[in-house]
Amino acid sequence: MEWLNRFTEVMDCISENPIEGIGISELSRRTSLSKSTVHRMLSSMMLHQLVTQNLQTKHYTLGPKAMFWGSQFLRAQDPIGLMGRYCEEVSRRTGQYSYLSRFQDDQVYCTHTHQPSQLRSKYFVHVGQRMPFNCSAASKAIIAYQEKEKICSLLAKESFTPITPYTITEWEALEKELETVITEGVSYCLQELEIGVSAISVPIFHDDGKTSMSLSVVGESSYFEFHHDRIVTALKEVSMSASEQLKSMNLLTSIKF
């Protein structure tokens, strides 16, 4: 339906600018809709609290209703709050910013984060953030365990756009890295998304060799290089506990993985 396509396009553009917002002229350019059409849509969306306008900049950002829908979706990814404590545990043991990610509807999203109070540096992995398949440790830890056909299908949709000089941009290189993930049980993002920042991830299994969740830490590359073994050990031990609990509780009967 045309109106739904227009609505989705506008919401996508606004969600891509969560902090500074976006103006009508830019929305019109990106969606190929006239300014008058965009203005009418935004006026209606404001009435339903789907978007809000900054009176100074005149830019639009997501409104309370959109945020509520998003939070309800994310709550459904971990309906009993089971995994959050493991995220906090790995932060306690490593002293690093940690986050959980979930694979659903052919995308990997961050669903939970934890920053130790003593950590000065702040990393901007946020709840709801999409994790690229080719250059995020969180995604690699999950898709490596998917069926071959599924992996090919997922990567066919990935742009492989280089973000830093370290970003993997070729399927063959990523294929080798995913094979290593299976062998070692750990995945990496070594300055692939931001220079000087790296992440390490491990899968959380809900059945033997099956996963749709990963547990990750992110921090300064130099720190990770120096403390690599200790961080990997903590991640693997915490994820093993999380996997055992998922299996013992037989969550497959209540959660669609």
Image (tube, helix red, strand yellow):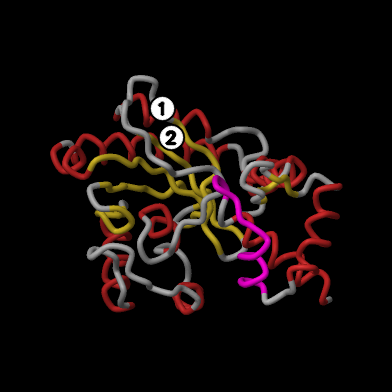
**27 in magenta:** yes
Q: Is residue 254 visible?
A: no
- Residue 243 position, x and y percent, is 47, 42
Q: What residue is rendered at 41% in x and 52% in y? A: 138
Q: What residue is rendered at 56% in x and 38% in y? A: 248
- Residue 53 position, x and y percent, is 71, 46
Q: Report helix, strand or loop for mark 1.
A: helix
Mark 1 / mark 2, whichever is N-terminal: 1
Quadrant of the rendering where the C terminus is positioned: bottom right
Query: Depth-wise, is mark 1 or mark 2 nearer the camera?
Result: 1
Q: Residue furthest top?
A: 118
Work out whether 136 lies above or below 37: above
Work out whether 195 lies above or below 168: above
- The stretch of residues the image draws in magenta is 18-31
Q: What residue is rendered at 44% in x and 40% in y? A: 99
Nearest the viewer among 52 and 15 is 52
Q: In this figure, which residue is indicated by the disc labeled 2?
A: 241
Query: Three-letter amino acid code at disc 2?
Result: Ser
Left or right of 248? Residue 136 is left
| C-alpha separation, residue under disc 1 versus residue under disc 2 | 11 Å
**128 in magenta:** no
Left or right of 230? Residue 14 is right
The 10 Å Cα crowd at callout 2, few under 14, some 14 to 19, many 20 or more, is few
Work out whether 32 lies above or below 229: below
Q: Report helix, strand or loop for mark 2.
A: helix
Quadrant of the rendering where the N terminus is positioned: bottom right
